[in-house]
Amino acid sequence: MNLTDITPGTPLPRLELPPISRTTLALFAGASGDHNAIHIDLDVARSAGLDDVFAQGMLSMAYLGRLLTDLVPQERIRSWSVRFAAITPLGAAPVCRATVAAAEDGLATLELAVTLADGTVTLAGTALVDIS
């Protein structure tokens, strides 16, 4: 994507993901090494007072990273930070969004979010990317 003529407030193409399944969680656990049982074992999740397992926060961050590298090559990402805000339940279909907050001197600040269908923001952050 060519980001050279963007202006603040510009929403960028979003990334829509399929619903989170148990398979998604198991595959991410294997790929990431995050085998925390609360994400893959129903009994452990229930013992913690939850109805079911939920997605690893880093899975949402990985999806957000995919959005960023869809927008700009990896070497143009200067910084990236996120805040985990809510869990992503089983069956939710996350949507990753980026909006231009500022653009000057060949750099753009992007406001980032991963949201669910009900509007819940599960992950929020910013990225500074080279758009020159």
Image: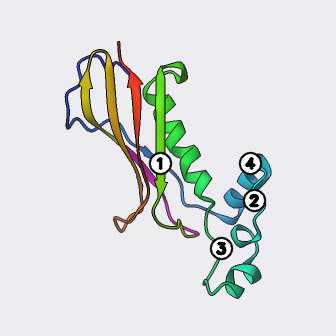
Q: CA distance from mark 4 to mark 3?
A: 17 Å
Where is residue 65 drawn, in percent x and y? Answer: 53, 38
On-image quarter of the C terminus: top left
Q: Residues at badges 4 and 2 in contact (C-beta under 8 Å)? A: no
**Type of amino acid at the residue the image marks with label 3:** Val
Query: What secondary structure predominates along the stretch shown in magenta?
Result: loop
Q: CA distance from mark 1 to mark 4?
A: 18 Å
Q: CA distance from mark 3 to mark 1?
A: 22 Å
Q: Is residue 91 magenta?
A: yes
- Answer few, some or many: residues within 10 Å of disc 4's Cα (few below 14, many 20 plus, some between 14 and 19): few
Give the mark toward the camera: 3 or 1: 1
Residue 128: image quadrant is top left
Residue 22: image quadrant is bottom right
Give the mark toward the camera: 2 or 1: 1
Rendered image: mark on residue 26: 2
Residue drawn at 74 percent across, 68 percent down: 40
Q: What residue is pinned by disc 3?
A: 53
Q: Secondary structure at mark 4?
A: helix
Residue drawn at 64 percent across, 63 percent down: 21
Rendered image: mark on residue 82: 1
**Type of amino acid at the residue the image marks with label 1:** Val
Where is residue 101 drawn, in percent x and y? Answer: 26, 37
Task: Spot the residue most to the top.
Answer: 132
Residue range highlighted in magenta: 90-97
Q: What residue is pinned by disc 4?
A: 32
